[in-house]
Image (cartoon, grey):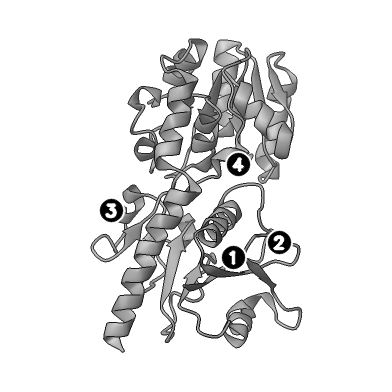
Amino acid sequence: MIIVQVAPDIIPLPGSGGLERIVYNLSDALVDMGHEVYIYALAGSRSSAIVIPYGHRYETSSIKDFVLDTLPDNTDIIHDHTHDLLFGKEDLHIPTVSTIHTEWSLDVPVKHPVYVSRTKLIQSPNRYKGYYVHNGIDLNEYKYSTNKKDYVLFLGRIDWEKGVHSAIEVAEMTGVRTIIAGPAWDEELFKQILPRINNSSNIEYVSEVHGKAKQDLLSHAKWLMFPTACEEQFGLVMIEAMACGTPVAAFPRGAVPEVLSGFPQFLCESVEAMAAKIIGDASVHPEQLRHYVSSRFTKEKMAERYLKIYEKVIAKNRFRG
């Protein structure tokens, strides 16, 4: 099958997490399965698929024009990952599927929507005609460890949606050593929380982390705190942590209960409940967490599910034609 993946033009692949990492993992898995895969992405992107960088003669608003003007011959399907779902909402002759990765894409009308959780599919107006595919990671990239150190970790964007303010409140309540890692997206919020961090001997901010530093933090944490304040589409960092053998204390918002369905005891209804949770040890062995991810959330399983959707959409398009 000749498959075209279209990534947003914001961060080169593979990126540090989230959408770009999913496109990267999916494309690599499809190549490993023997398919011919092309990725339209920002210059500097890398992949085992064939990368076609966005042309300089096109403005950002003309990504669609550039892709359609340069599509490989005999493309079987286009997989649209752009924030505005530029291709899914067009009446193209080439079958197109659109993954809704973000909250602001939920209301964009597309022919073949794919959500990253069953929760979001059911909540959407497309519940009877859409699909869902869980995000998947490359398990080999995540360092597994049973050697947990005496700290809890918050790993995510510094903004209201990811709930960093709740993580700091938990740290202040418990006195447990807490490491905050992530880019300061919301500068005003960062200015508000920085004095609290500086005045707390048990809280440390280490900025954004990647590679080995990220792996070390995830694999040795006693708990990952995921106090999300938004209706999560999925919550990729939860499966990253569990792949490292690290338990997750999380607020049950959006798809969080779905992703943690195997470990409902990790769900916390309040800051107080999360504080009580992270003071103690998880009742689950790290190996169980790793196995849980390997059985549900790998890039191979993600690719297999997407291929089934590609085949259905191609068949529907052929029948329509």
Q: Residue at x 55, y 85 (%)?
A: 73
Q: Secondary structure at mark 4?
A: loop
- Farthest-out residue, left: 128
Q: CA distance from mark 4 to mark 3?
A: 27 Å
- Farthest-out residue, front: 34
Q: Are marks 2 and 1 in contact (CB under 8 Å)?
A: yes
Q: Residue at x 56, y 18 (%)?
A: 146
Residue type at tag 1: Ala
- Residue annotated with mark 3: 122
Q: Is residue 128 above or below residue 245?
A: below
Q: Is residue 118 left or right of residue 28?
A: left
Q: Earlier in the sequence, mark 2 or mark 1?
A: 1
Quarter the C terminus occupies = bottom left
- Residue annotated with mark 1: 7
Residue type at tag 3: Ile
Q: Earlier in the sequence, mark 2 or mark 4?
A: 2
- Residue annotated with mark 4: 159
Q: Secondary structure at mark 3?
A: helix
- Residue annotated with mark 2: 45
